[in-house]
């Protein structure tokens, strides 16, 4: 997998990298963005969408990161799970919160599989 470093990036990639660094207050972008930079339109589109979705709104930033972490873990993406665990911790997720999140994920996975295996019909009114 090719990773595009800032020094080797085209101007349109550098512009996105600069926005990521400024928005997040970081010195360098992580490998996800460097990998996406092999296709500048995908890099830009993904960053713009993520920036909009993860901006403060009706759901606070920590909850958004924890939801992203849960979805990433459920999807089996090790990279995104690690990235969003770090981001959630930076936004205030405690070890106790992380433990409860993992317990909910595990329980949901178990009950989801049971409901699917048993083909439980959906109750009226749900």
Image (cartoon, rainbow, N blue to C red):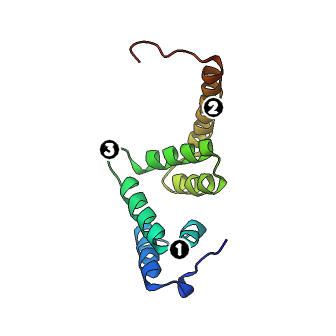
Q: Of 71 and 93, which appears nearest the observer?
A: 71
Local SS, label 1: loop
Local SS, label 3: loop
Local SS, label 2: helix
Q: Is residue 9 above or below residue 122?
A: below
List x then y, in percent, for residue 77.
63, 51
Q: Of 4 and 56, which appears nearest the observer?
A: 4
List x then y, in percent, for residue 123.
46, 13
Q: Is residue 65 above or below residue 107?
A: below
Say which label, 1 or 3, has the lower sequence index. Answer: 1
Q: At x 51% / y 48%, what residue is drawn?
A: 68
Say which label, 2 or 3, has the lower sequence index. Answer: 3
Q: Is residue 98 above or below residue 42?
A: above
Q: Mark 2 against mark 3, which lies toward the viewer?
A: 2
Q: Mark 1 against mark 3, which lies toward the viewer?
A: 1
In the rendered structure, the answer to whether residue 120 lies left or right of residue 1 reads left
Q: Which mark is residue 109?
A: 2
**Residue where numbered disc 1 is placed:** 37
Q: Residue furthest bottom?
A: 7
Q: Which mark is residue 107?
A: none
Q: At x 56% / y 86%, what residue is drawn?
A: 8
Q: At x 49% / y 16%, what residue is drawn?
A: 122
In the rendered structure, the answer to whether residue 66 lies left or right of residue 110 reads left
**Residue where numbered disc 3 is placed:** 58
Q: Of 33 and 85, which appears nearest the observer?
A: 33
Mark 3 closeness class: few <14, some 14–19, many ≥20 residues within 10 Å: few
Query: Residue 70's image quarter?
Result: top right
Q: Do callouts 1 and 3 mark residues in contact (Cβ within 8 Å)? A: no
């Amino acid at each position: 997998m090719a990773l595009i470093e800032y020094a080797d990036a085209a101007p349109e990639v550098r512009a996105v990298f600069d926005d990521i660094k400024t928005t997040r207050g970081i010195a360098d972008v992580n490998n996800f963005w460097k990998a996406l930079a092999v296709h500048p339109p995908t890099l830009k589109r993904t960053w713009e969408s993520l920036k909009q979705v993860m901006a403060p709104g009706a759901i606070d930033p920590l909850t958004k990161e924890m939801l992203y972490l849960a979805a990433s873990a459920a999807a089996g993406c090790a990279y995104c799970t690690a990235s969003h665990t770090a981001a959630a911790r930076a936004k205030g997720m405690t070890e106790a919160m992380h433990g409860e999140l993992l317990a909910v994920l595990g329980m949901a996975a178990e009950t989801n599989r049971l409901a699917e295996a048993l083909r439980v019909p959906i109750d009226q009114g749900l």
